[in-house]
Image (spheres, grey):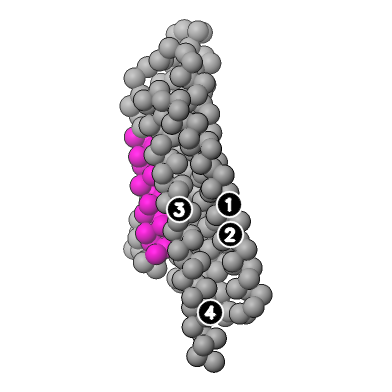
Amino acid sequence: MEQQHRHFQEKLDDLSLKLLRLGGLVEEAIGRSVLALVGRDSALARRVMSDDAEVDRLELEVDHLCMEILALQQPFARDLRFITTAMKLTTDLERMGDLAVNVAERALELNEEPLLKPLIDIPLMARRAQEMVHGALDAFVRRDADAARLVILRDDDLDRRMELVFRELLALMIQDSRSVARAVRLTSVAKYFERIGDHATNVCEQVVFMIEGRVIKHPGLTGEPKDDARP
């Protein structure tokens, strides 16, 4: 029995390590994608795109390991919540990696044209998104529901910055029709970072569920009291 328990714990530890590796790759992809955009570095943009294959491979590894543990170990309660949370986390992390690739693709396109404007708010959005991803993963590792709730609060800042970027770029398009294509691409980039924040929020909501067994995503549907994300 003790050997079986040890083997089970080793599987869970392996799962945690793979998730952290996946999260680290996604964080790197986000950071490199914005560097490729701001630095007009097409080689770096292509690296982000090629490195996404490793994100996809690791996602499949995590999914396979989760299914193996569920099938062979039949975990209960806390361990079951951890495994089901891990399965959902991989989906959000893989999608964040895809969004970083989208940023890299827009960077390649924009690098072929003159710079439309100095990039200020979009790099700030990228930094906020990256911080949210890091904070979400840290909350997961430390099993800290309060830290997860604090990360959720940061999503409002990304939403506000998205609105500012949209308004500024819309004004440029109105003033000069020649700027439309570049402005639309930059709007897309801002939206990608805003969506990364949404996925980081999803991760944090899953962390709260893993720790407390509470679903805070749709309180009106679950019957849970509204969670204001404050500890």
Where is mark 1, residue-wise? Answer: 57
Q: Is residue 100 above or below residue 206?
A: above
Residue 32 visible in the current orientation: yes
State the separation of the CA atoms marked 3 and 1.
13 Å
C-alpha distance separating marks 2 and 3: 14 Å
Identify the amino acid type marked 4. Phe
Mark 3 vs mark 1: which is more N-terminal? 3
Closest to the observer, 177 or 127: 127
Secondary structure state at the residue bearing disc 3? helix
Q: Nearer the viewer, residue 30 or 220?
A: 30
> Is 39 situated above or below 172?
below
Q: Verify CB contact (< 8 Å) between mark 4 and mark 2.
A: no
For the image, the number of numbered tags is 4
Q: CA distance from mark 3 to mark 4?
A: 23 Å
Q: Amino acid at mark 1?
A: Arg
State the mark number for residue 61. Answer: 2
Residue 199 or residue 171, whichever sits in front: 199
Distance in Å between CA atoms under marks 4 and 2: 17 Å
Q: Which residue is mark 3?
A: 23
Residue type at tag 2: Glu
Q: Of label 4 and label 2, which has the lower sequence position?
A: 4
Q: Position of residue 208 (x, y in %)?
A: 45, 65
